[in-house]
Image: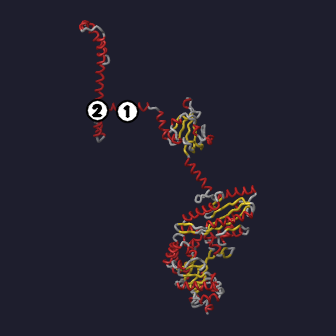
Amino acid sequence: MIAALPALLAFAAFEWLQANPQWIEDAGIRSYWLLATLVVFLATLPSLIWAWMIAARRRRDIDAISVLMEAIEATESADELSTIADPDMHMLGQNAENLRQKLMRAIDPAYHLNLILDTVNDAIFVSTADGVIRRANSAACNLVGYQEQELLGLPIQRLVSPDRKDAFPLDATTEATDTVLLSRDGNRIPVSVSCSVVSTADPRFQGNIYIARNISDRKRAEKRIRYLARYDALTRIPNRMQFQHLLQRNIARAKRRKLELAMLYLDMDQFKEVNDTFGHAAGDQCLEVIAQRLKAVLGENVVIGRLAGDEFGIVLEGFANDKEARYRASDVARLILDRINNAFYIQDSEVFITATIGIACYPRDADNVIDIIRNADAAMYHAKQNGGNTGQLYLPEMNAAAVERLMLKSKLRKALERKELIVRYLPKIDLRNGKIAGAEALLRWRLPGHGDIAPSQFIPLAEEGSMISEIGDWVLRKVCNDYKHWQEYVPSPGRIAVNLSLRQLMRPNVSKRIREIFRETQVSPTALELELTETTLMHDSRRTIRILDDLYAMGLHLAIDDFGTGYSSLSALKDFPISTLKIDQSFVRNADMDSSDAAMVKTIIEMGRNLDLEVVAEGVENQAQLGLLRQYNCTYAQGHLFGEAMSAKKFLDQLISQNEGARQHQALFA
């Protein structure tokens, strides 16, 4: 009805003008323009009225929404809210929701796709069937350093390194392929790429999708693993496996060229003492220094490898004959030893390291990798047995000794379990009255089929590993148990001396461990005396003094064994809590025939007396030596003259006999 109102008004106006033509004439109007203007105005007027009515209605709706929002903000419960809404507002909300859903359906689906692609961490390239890039996500742009607009239209092969184009997949792949892309700056980027082919009836959507993942971290890890498989991480020189590979290559080259080569097997002397004294970090530092010094002497072109903990291998090649090979290898060995012997500093302490080198030549001593390494090792061990700090050429007879050494080392590991280790007691005699005043505990190894193995043979083997600590604890516990048993028959069995090696002394918590053994066996520490060599005392003297002070405070007596053979000074001697000096048997043996040895013995006895120390002479074998010692007022002595080292039972028998009044050595002191 309202929509037809303009037409009705216009028609009515037209009829009125026709019925009153004189009005137009009276107004002086001679044209129909006025008529047209009037008609348009009358036609527009209802529309303006209609627009005003709609605006007023919407204004009321907006005012209602405002009132509603204020009410919602002031409302504390849903029940109160339900009283506010009215059907009109519900209809308004429903219309708004419908409008929102229509807008969401109108959004381009490509927006969702772009959002997903740019969220993925892997680089994604979308190309045509012939490899022209049509789309690249953010990860792809970041990977190669281009903006997406710069990539569009480029052949994807242009991003691939020329030397790896054959590894780039052009068709669908079942698994990823490793290749290399080039960034905008020309950097090589290792990636793992897979390709999927988009097949559809619409040619506009056919093409390839490439997914690339940066594998730089993986490649670095793989490179590190390959390096560690062939090189020693600490010294950065070839490890044993790589050294053997390089030695095999050099042997093959020498064979082709009809030349000879030499292998040097280097082992550090007393390296374990550095570890025990300063810790493993210091030991690692020492190994690094040794590797650097080897490189400095030999140069970068000589094969150097770390074969084991403190063992190194060196290959020298290009010799015309075996004489030249042996001569040059010996000369190089001397140069190496001179360089290694230079001092270096660990924890503000000056440390001197020596080494021993064994030399074997190809083809004179061996014609394969295994044998030449074994023979060089045998030569090294032979030199170490003779004092070390030297080089030694291989000789065939050395293999027998090396085999024997390996056999003993293997059997020693089971010696404790099989109860093959035994303790013998060498009596200590008081030279003032000829009575037993104690004994020295001596370790023996009774190996079935081989008889008794001397300590000089198996103790160095035990010191090469951790066995010396285990054996040392066993000896101390065995002596304490024997002493506890003796006390059941003899109130005062005398003081028993037990040897303590450098490795035992320097192990962590040595005082605590010794204290625990005394507590377990319920024996007083005053019953025992620990013997240490001069070399042991002077090794890291500050630390040694701290340890010995702890042991002395525990009640233990401390003795210097083999005194006179080391390098301790009197000024250093007074700093240690020592109670006994033991004169080495090398001086006592010839004291009755050599005036120099006699003077040395006399000097040590007088020095000990002046320092208020007990003095024990070792290795007394005849009456003349005994008489000389008594003349010099030596306090105690031990040796074959007073009997061989004996079992705990036999020693107890002598103690019981003496306690009952018998004097076994009365004739010697008549």
The residue beneath circle 2 is: 64
Marker disc for residue 97? 1
Q: Quadrant of residue 174?
A: top right
Asked if the residue under mark 1 is in contact with the one under mark 2, i.e. CB atoms within 8 Å, the reply is no
Residue sitting nearer the eye, 89 or 384 = 384
- Across and down, in percent, residue 181 comes to 57, 42
Image position of 275 with respect to 441: above or below: above
- Across and down, in percent, residue 217 comes to 55, 49
- Across and down, in percent, residue 74 comes to 27, 40
Measure how far apart labels 2 and 1 are at the Cα level. 18 Å
What amino acid is labelled 1 in the image? Glu
User: How many marks on residues?
Assistant: 2
Q: Quadrant of residue 335?
A: bottom right
Residue located at (46% from left, 34% from top): 111
Its colouring scheme is secondary structure
Residue located at (60% from left, 54% from top): 227
Can residue 474 be seen at all in this image of the molecule?
no
Can residue 343 be seen at all in this image of the molecule?
yes
